[in-house]
Structures are given as C-alpha cells and as structure tokens.
Amino acid sequence: MRKFKLGLIWAAALLLPGCFTACQNEEDLVMQDDEETVELNVVAHVSVDFDNESRTSYTPTETSFDFAWSKGDQVIVVSEDGRRNLGVMTLKGDGGTSYADFSGTIRARTTDKKVNVYYLGRKTTDNLGSKYVNMVYDLSNQETSLANITDYGVMHSLADLQRDADNNAIMQFSVKSLMSYARFSFHFIPENVVATNEAVSVKGTHIYNGYKLGFAGAAITEQNEGPVSIVPDWSNKAGGDACMVLVPATAAVTEFEVTVGGVLYKASLD
C-alpha cells in the first residue's frame, strides 16, 4: 500500500447536483385528481439564493462554479404536502445568468396557497408531470467532469401561489441548492506513478451514496453512508481532476482509494 496526495482545489456547500440515477418511490402515492381544481397560466420569476449557490455553468471560478440556466430547463410544481404534481414550467429563452423566467400551465385547488417548486436537473426530464411524494437518488457512481456535474441539479423553493380572476398567476421566488459538491485534484507519491482510467473510491464518515428526497418541505432522509466511485481526468499533467456531488453533511471524514498497476494507494481529507 502506498499513499497519494490529494490537493483540494475547493469544496463548498454550493450545488445541488443531486444525483446520477433517480427513481420515483411507488409507496403510498396519491394521484392528482380534478376535485376543486382549476387550470392556471403561470409565469414565474426565479432567482438564485446566492447564500446557497446552485446549479452552475461549466467554468469554475477560484471559489465556486458560475451559475447559469440552460435552454429547455424545467421545474415541477408540487402541492405543499408533496402529494400532488400540479404541473411543469419551462424556461423562457436561451438561459444564462442566475435569474430566469419560467412559464407553464398547472392545475391547482382553490385552497392551494403555497406550492413546492423543484428543479431536478437538466437530464431529469422524463415524466416530470408524474413525479410527486418523493424520489430516491443513487450517488454511488458519478460522472465527474465539469460537463457532467451540472446535469443533475437539485434546487427548491416554497413559493406563494396567487391568482387573479382570469386564472393567471405570477410567482416570484428564489431557489436554493439541496446538495453540495467538491472539486479535487489527485497527485501520486511517488510521482512516477501514472493512472489512466482508474476510478477513485471515496468513502468515510458522513459520505453518502444515496438518499431520499421528500417533496413535502424538501426533506432529505434515508441517507446511506457508503462508498462513491468517481473517475478523475488523469490526463491533466497537474494531477487527476474530478468533481463530486455530496449530500450536505457536517464533520465529514473523507478517505480515498485507487488501485494502479495492482498497487493500492490511499489518501484522506477532512
């Protein structure tokens, strides 16, 4: 066993990139019904809570990733209790910047005064109108380039729903991330060790490879402590570079392992 050195470029509770596989939990689901519902045309003015920075563009700054929306991004609107999917809104325009307008049609009850709004990522686009109650996320194998880290943002807002007599609604709210991420650079000791496509196993106290997101109040539960596999870009002469999605946690003790040429190398970082 030999050691390799880990250089932490930065790590912060910024992102929600939530997941790399997700599935709808089928237990105790309540289908949307038409009882006392009305169709609303909604325009939402959405900004980012920069105290909890969210989804990002591909270019990192010295301390974080620059945020940007992408063309075609969508958000789902769920009842306050999380048990009814009211509809989907789509980004207006080509994206960019931290502020954006979304529009769409939702079906809401007259008693719906607040709603949960979720952004589930650029690649989580299938059957958005049927997602409600909760989703289960698997983080155990992650694509870790900058291009992939932005595919699975998880952002949330509890927003006021006010409508006029013509069944139009204008919403204005800020979304914030539910996830965290870090960017790492790996350097081997001795320096003549060369990795190619080897995956690094990340594990340790408060390192989770799965969780459940409840749509009522954005509750994160059933966190599964276990290893996460990331594949650095070993072609970088300055060291292997990788980004990693994290479930928010405190007091994490992170351990890294990689086998190159039949030799196990280890490193650790609080």
Image (tube, rainbow, N blue to C red):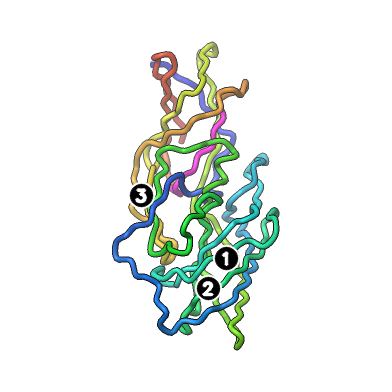
Residue underneath mark 1: 89
Mark 3 secondary-structure assignment:
strand
Q: Position of residue 83 (x, y in %)?
A: 39, 69
Residue underneath mark 2: 106
Q: Nearer the viewer, mark 3 or mark 2?
A: 2
Q: Is residue 183 left or right of residue 32?
A: right
Above or below, comparing residue 126 to residue 253 in the picture: below
Residue farthest to the top, as pictured: 192
> Do callouts 3 and 1 mark residues in contact (Cβ within 8 Å)?
no
Q: Is residue 216 left or right of residue 146?
A: left
> Do callouts 1 and 2 mark residues in contact (Cβ within 8 Å)?
yes
Q: Earlier in the sequence, mark 3 or mark 1?
A: 1
Q: Earlier in the sequence, mark 3 or mark 2?
A: 2
Q: Position of residue 73 (x, y in %)?
A: 59, 56
Residue 113 within the magenta-colored segment of the rendering? no
Query: For the residues marked 3 and 1, what is the alpha-carbon distance in whole angstroms?
Result: 29 Å
Q: Which residues are magenta?
A: 241-249
Residue at 56% in and 51% down: 122
Mark 1 secondary-structure assignment:
strand
Residue at 62% in and 59% down: 48
Residue 247 within the magenta-colored segment of the rendering? yes
Image disc number at residue 223: 3
Residue type marked 3: Gln
